[in-house]
């Protein structure tokens, strides 16, 4: 009987790591899409934390926080935070960054 519990525990651990990998891939895609939309250069992403949470509105979900490194002008790099509820982007927190002012005169 204890073999069933060992197998169940093993499969739960494997599922946990596979699901965290799926969240990391979704976070990377979300960060790249956000940077493209805001005309930023995506550099890197790293997981800060993942926690199981409960909310009346969302139910049980994984709250994951990622550090996102980006550049606005190709010279300086900045680090922001991205919050995911499950696989969906909930919030993007970026510091103040320099805007690239390459203005083209059409006259």
Image (tube, grey):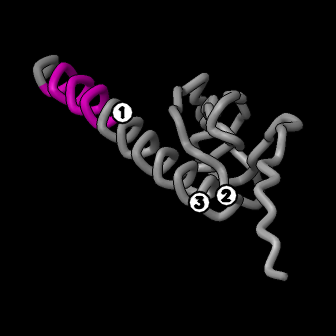
4 relative to 57, above or below: above
Which of the marked residues, 2 or 1, is nearer the chain's N terminus?
Answer: 1
* Residue range corresponding to the magenta coloring: 4-16
Find residue 39 and name its label. 2
25 relative to 8, above or below: below
Please name the residue shown 62% across and 31% down the image.
Answer: 69
Indicate the secondary structure of the residue bearing disc 2.
loop
On whether residue 94 falls in the magenta region, the answer is no
Find residue 36 and name its label. 3
Please name the residue shown 71% across and 43% down the image.
Answer: 72
Q: Quadrant of residue 30?
A: bottom right
Mark 1 Cα shell of 10 Å, populated few (<14), some (14-19), many (≥20): few
Q: Which of 23 and 62 is in front in this view?
A: 23
54 relative to 33, above or below: above
Asked whether the residues under the numbered discs 2 and 3 touch, taking CB atoms below 8 Å apart as contact, a structural biologist would say yes
Q: Which of 68 and 88 is in front in this view?
A: 68
Q: Which of 86 and 105 is in front in this view?
A: 105
Find residue 16 and name its label. 1
Q: Quadrant of residue 83?
A: top right
Please name the residue shown 57% across and 29% down the image.
Answer: 50
Work out how far the residue at label 1 is from the one at label 3, CA to CA, in angstroms.
30 Å
Mark 3 Cα shell of 10 Å, populated few (<14), some (14-19), many (≥20): few
Work out how far the residue at label 2 is from the one at label 1, CA to CA, in angstroms.
34 Å
- Mark 2 or 1: in front is 2
Which of the marked residues, 1 or 3, is nearer the chain's N terminus?
Answer: 1
Work out how far the residue at label 2 is from the one at label 3, CA to CA, in angstroms.
5 Å
Q: Quadrant of residue 74?
A: top right
On whether residue 12 falls in the magenta region, the answer is yes
């Amino acid at each position: 009987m204890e073999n069933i519990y060992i197998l169940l525990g093993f499969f739960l651990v494997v599922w946990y790591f596979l699901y965290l990998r799926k969240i990391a891939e979704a976070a990377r895609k979300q960060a790249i899409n956000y940077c493209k939309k805001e005309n930023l250069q995506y550099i890197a992403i790293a997981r800060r934390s993942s926690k199981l949470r409960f909310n009346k509105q969302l139910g049980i979900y994984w709250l994951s926080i990622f550090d996102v490194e980006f550049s606005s002008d190709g010279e300086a790099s900045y680090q922001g935070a991205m919050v995911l509820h499950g696989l969906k982007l909930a919030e993007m927190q970026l510091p103040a960054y320099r805007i690239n002012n390459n203005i083209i005169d059409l006259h």
